[in-house]
Amino acid sequence: MVNQRDRIALVVTLSGALTLVSLFSRPVCAQAPAPAAELKIGGAVSSPQVVTAADFKKMPRRTLKVVNPHDKKAEVYEGVALEELLRRAGAPQGEQLRGPVMATYVIAEAEDGYRVVFSLAELDFEFLDADLLVADTMDGAPLGANQGPFRLVAPHEKRPARWVRMLKSITVVRAAMQ
């Protein structure tokens, strides 16, 4: 039995040759457009954000030169400081980090489900010089599909286990009090 979508017609031309003609036109190489690069920042913040790649380019930019601990290769990342992104979303910072707020943490999640945790205080320059960067370029070029469009870079860590490639969200969470 021939499926309605797959039906074809036989057409006899004047020369007597048979020609197969599709009754349905389907583009052969059509692909859905790639989804826009977005980074979601939410949770216990006063102004949740969805930052696009275009928004990202308009923010204050920083450059980090690091040696990737995995392969010992020097890399130059450019992007926006994680502290700046948290500030724009209204996460507690500076003098607001005291008392119960000190039990607040940040979850950075990748497209593939990989997640890491930082305490909110360790991301604040008044506590530590963490220097975390959400990068969108490496060595002057946009991050490749297996790294980006955004990558969290934690340059001062001895192991890059909290470097998050394909970063999709940053969520601020207040730990439940007993």
Image (cartoon, rainbow, N blue to C red):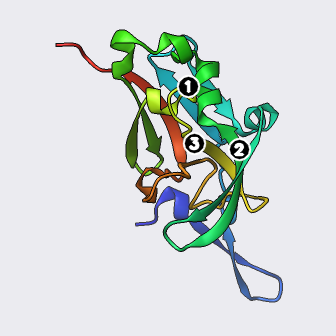
Rendered image quadrant of residue 7: bottom right
- Given residues 131 and 107, the one toward you in this image is 131
Query: Which three-letter amino acid code belongs to the residue tagged 2?
Result: Gly
**Which of marks 2 and 1 precedes in the sequence?**
2
Rendered image quadrant of residue 58: top right
Q: Which residue is mark 3?
A: 132
- How far separated are the C-alphas under marks 1 and 2? 21 Å
Q: Above or below — where is 37 with respect to 93?
A: below
**Which of marks 1 and 3 precedes in the sequence?**
1
Query: Which three-letter amino acid code belongs to the residue tagged 3?
Result: Leu
> Is disc 2 placed on a helix, strand or loop?
strand
Between marks 2 and 3 in the image, the one whose residue lies nearer the viewer: 3
The crowd level at tag 2 (other Cα within 10 Å; few <14, some 14-19, many 20+) is many
For image coordinates 79% across by 38% down, the residue present is 57
The crowd level at tag 1 (other Cα within 10 Å; few <14, some 14-19, many 20+) is few
- Where residue 43 appears, x then y in whole percent? 44, 20
User: Extreme left residue here?
Assistant: 178
> Is disc 1 placed on a helix, strand or loop?
loop
The crowd level at tag 3 (other Cα within 10 Å; few <14, some 14-19, many 20+) is many
- Where residue 165 appears, x then y in whole percent? 53, 53
Q: Which mark is residue 126?
A: 1
Query: Which three-letter amino acid code belongs to the residue tagged 1?
Result: Glu
Q: Above or below — where is 154 with respect to 177?
A: below
> Is disc 3 placed on a helix, strand or loop?
loop
Q: Which residue is mark 2?
A: 79
Between marks 1 and 2 in the image, the one whose residue lies nearer the viewer: 1
